[in-house]
Image (tube, helix red, strand yellow):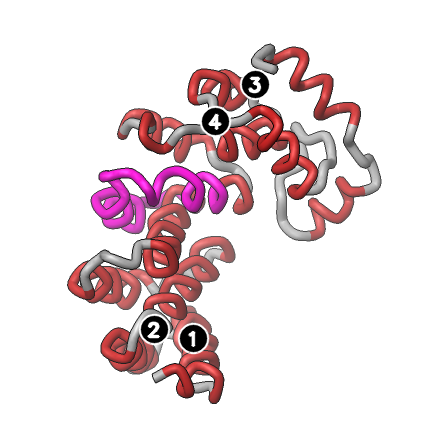
Amino acid sequence: MNDVDFILSELQSINEPDYLKKMAHFGIDISKAFGIRVPNIRKLGKQIGKNQELSLLLWKTGFHEARLLATFIGDYKQVTEVQINAWTKDFSSWDVCDQACGNLFVKTPYFKSKAFEFAAAETEFVKRTGFVLMAEAAVHLKKEPDETFLAFLSVIEREAYDNRNFVKKAANWALRQIGKRNAFLHQHSIETANNILAQNNKKANWVALDALRELNSNAVLAKF
């Protein structure tokens, strides 16, 4: 199953037109979408298996679900910095951004440099990518040293003023995930949130206050 046209027809055969409304409701760009639930796309991806060449071809089609599928079947070991840059420029929906980061980008040797680079970008989804990489790293990269995340916290503090929806939610996500990684980073994440509040910037407050609610919750405190 490596023919792009055949796979697009398979995607069309499992679409749910009514689901497009739900996608739009959740802030997903449906300008070139079929309307397919992610578990169904993931199931198709498992049937196909890892295929980097096909992943790149599916991405080029521009279809929302084809791009999601591309993140599921891509081989992170073959993902280059050039590919990361190109795909990131193409992002127009948070779900494709997040899946590409979690399934592929964060597993590459470039994740750290790209997190710093993208978090300083101007374009909304490029900037989101930087913070999603931080969040995904905090969750999945168990051997990554604390120093990496301390550096990420400085960036989150610096960029918390950005009140664009998809940026602030990703920055908040990264702050929360770093704070839940271990007791040391929990303390520093709390400090980062308080430093953000000390900026007296109303646009930055939500990132900090929402993170503090979770980081000070009984469930999180019990872990440490």
Residue 211 has which mark?
Answer: 1
Compared with 204, 96 (above or below) is: above
Of tags 2 and 1, which is closer to the observer?
Answer: 2
- Pointer 1 local density, CA inside 10 Å: few below 14, some 14–19, many at least 20: many
Q: Secondary structure at mark 3?
A: helix
Location of residue 151 in the rendering, given as x and y in whole percent from the top left corner: 19, 61
In space, the residues marked 2 and 1 are separated at their CA atoms by 9 Å
In this orientation, which residue lies closer to the viewer: 220 or 152? 220
* Circle 2 residue: 179
Which residue occupies 75% across, 24% down?
12
- Pointer 2 local density, CA inside 10 Å: few below 14, some 14–19, many at least 20: many
Start-end of magenta stretch: 97-124
* Circle 3 residue: 61
Q: Secondary structure at mark 4?
A: loop
Q: Earlier in the sequence, mark 3 or mark 2?
A: 3
Residue 117 has which mark?
Answer: none
Q: The N terminus lies in which quarter of the figure? A: top right
Q: Main secondary structure of the magenta part?
A: helix
In space, the residues marked 4 and 1 are separated at their CA atoms by 36 Å
Question: What amino acid type should be assigned to the residue bearing mark 2?
Answer: Gly
